[in-house]
Image: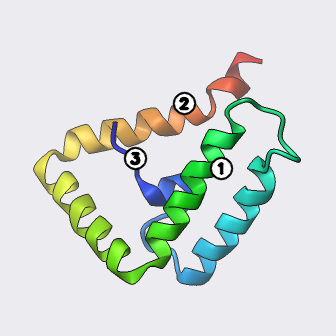
Amino acid sequence: MIHDLYFILGLTNKATPAEIKQAYHSLLKEYHPDRNDDPEAVKKLEKIIDTYKTLTNPQKKGEYEKERAARVTDNPTKVTLTIWFEYLNTFKPVMEN
């Protein structure tokens, strides 16, 4: 599965460092185990932390951006569909209630 790091933080690839930091801190609070008893919260929190580490490290971010651009160029339809499915799955628990 393709994971768009910006999507994990709820941002676009045009996000500024300040927006990345703000989204990271907001999600940390939301998914922290002391505040969220969802069994998946720890996994989500780990993914958020890893994402932040990548997007705030210039070398890792550069490597990610190159990989991301290659994925989009190689198979844009697959990337688009995958991103939409990930987006829709984030609302699945809301729709099931």
Q: Earlier in the sequence, mark 1 or mark 3?
A: 3
- The residue that disc 2 covers is 89
Q: Residue at x 55, y 50 (%)?
A: 47
- The residue that disc 3 covers is 3
Is residue 24 positioned above or below 8 on the image? below
Q: Earlier in the sequence, mark 3 or mark 2?
A: 3
Q: For marks 1 and 3, give the CA distance.
A: 15 Å
Amino acid type indicated by mark 2: Asn
Q: For marks 3 and 2, give the CA distance.
A: 13 Å
The structure's colour scheme is rainbow
Disc assigned to residue 45? 1
Q: Residues within 10 Å of mark 2 (few under 14, many from 20)?
A: few
Amino acid type indicated by mark 3: His
What element does badge 1 sit on?
Answer: helix
Is mark 2 in CB contact (under 8 Å) with mark 1?
no
Closest to the observer: 79 or 64? 64
Q: Residue at x 28, y 44 (%)?
A: 79
Percent position of residue 15, x then y: 51, 74
